[in-house]
Image (tube, helix red, strand yellow):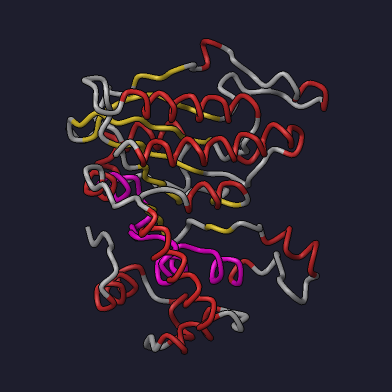
Amino acid sequence: MIPENVMNEPSWYESSARARINGLLDADSFSEILGPVDRVMSPHLALFDLPPAFDDGMIIGRGSIDGRSVAVAAQEGQFMGGTFAEVSGAKLVGLLRAVARSAGTPQAVSTVFLLLDTGGVRLQEANAGEMAVSETIRAILDVRKAGVPVVALIGGRAGAFGGGGLVTACCSHIIISEQGRISVSGPEVIETNKGVEEFDSRDRALVWRVTGGRSRVLLGGADAYVKGDIASFRKSAAQVSNSVPSFSLQTLEQEQERLEQRLQAYGGCRDTPEIWTIAGLPTPDGIADLTEDEFIRLLAKEGIRHDAR
């Protein structure tokens, strides 16, 4: 059953984490774990005179998509940039570990969906945040080893930067919209360490050309591209929820080889039009300016998965 609010096609980028969950899952199917009523909050933010959130910006629980049981975790990018910290990280890792333990039992879920919207590690809880990222990566790999796919959905205001970029790369599938961004180092971090000549973080067009959804899907950093409304994310999520990609040493070796070839081909490029020229894409200077429908037609021509709803 498609939720009623999906029919109005609200924007994924503009919506809160809870609205994304409600639109993604079957109506009234979400059962939250450690929700705001439990008031499990960061014990550290008060030391910095910062207000906490009753859910610490991480919403976890179970629900269904088209009747299939799934687990879901969503970061609230508007709270502390959706950052990984002690409580938010523990909630996510706990959910993933529970999924891995229940795999193959009557309580198992078919898929885990991570609605990532994060700038990375919360600086006020840096050590705990770094541990949360590493434990999340280990837990994702355990879930995948147990035969349960983990799907990242990227299209929020904060993107998926820092540890969030690493977590995204460990998932079975990555679904992204034009508004989504993925990178290990954020634009401000690059500029601070290498200078504005290397990367101007204030140049929004540059930031989206390099880290945005269009670049990521064309380079193989995401394997499905959707229009930026919740309904499109739901449709794509439903399609991959029963797809379990191979997860073996051979899989990792093939991915390593692909990345080495990509670096060799494009490592000297400073902006995406140079990459698209080498890749032989039509009108390389104009790809960022294509309409959604024009870009989706380009993806279809290149044989890249997309949602043409």
Depth order, front residue of 202/46: 46
- Position of 38 relative to 246 (above/below): above
Chain part drawn in magenta: 206-235
As drawn, is 158 to the left or to the right of 104?
A: right
Residue name at image x 76 percent, y 27 percent = 50
Q: In the image, is residue 219 part of the stretch drawn in magenta? A: yes
What x and y, as percent, mark residue 91?
A: 52, 25
The residue located at (41%, 67%) in the rendering is 220
In this view, the residue in front, 37 or 168, is 168
Q: Quadrant of the N terminus?
A: top left
Q: Main secondary structure of the magenta part?
A: helix
Left or right for 71, reference 192: left
Q: Position of residue 73 (x, y in %)?
A: 44, 32
Does 278 sit above or below residue 206? below
Q: Residue at x 53, y 37 (%)?
A: 136
For this view, does 251 lie left or right of residue 120?
Answer: left
Q: Residue furthest front?
A: 249
Which residue is the extreme one toward the top?
38
In the depicted structure, whether residue 57 falls above or below residue 280: above
Q: How many marks?
A: 0
Quarter assignment of residue 110: top left
| Residue at (36% x, 58% y) in the render | 251
x, y percentage for residue 25? 29, 33
Q: Check the picture and name the quadrant holding the C terminus.
A: bottom left
Q: Quadrant of residue 77?
A: top right
Percent coordinates x, y for residue 170 in the rendering: 46, 49
Q: Quadrant of residue 28?
A: top left
- Is residue 188 in the magenta section? no
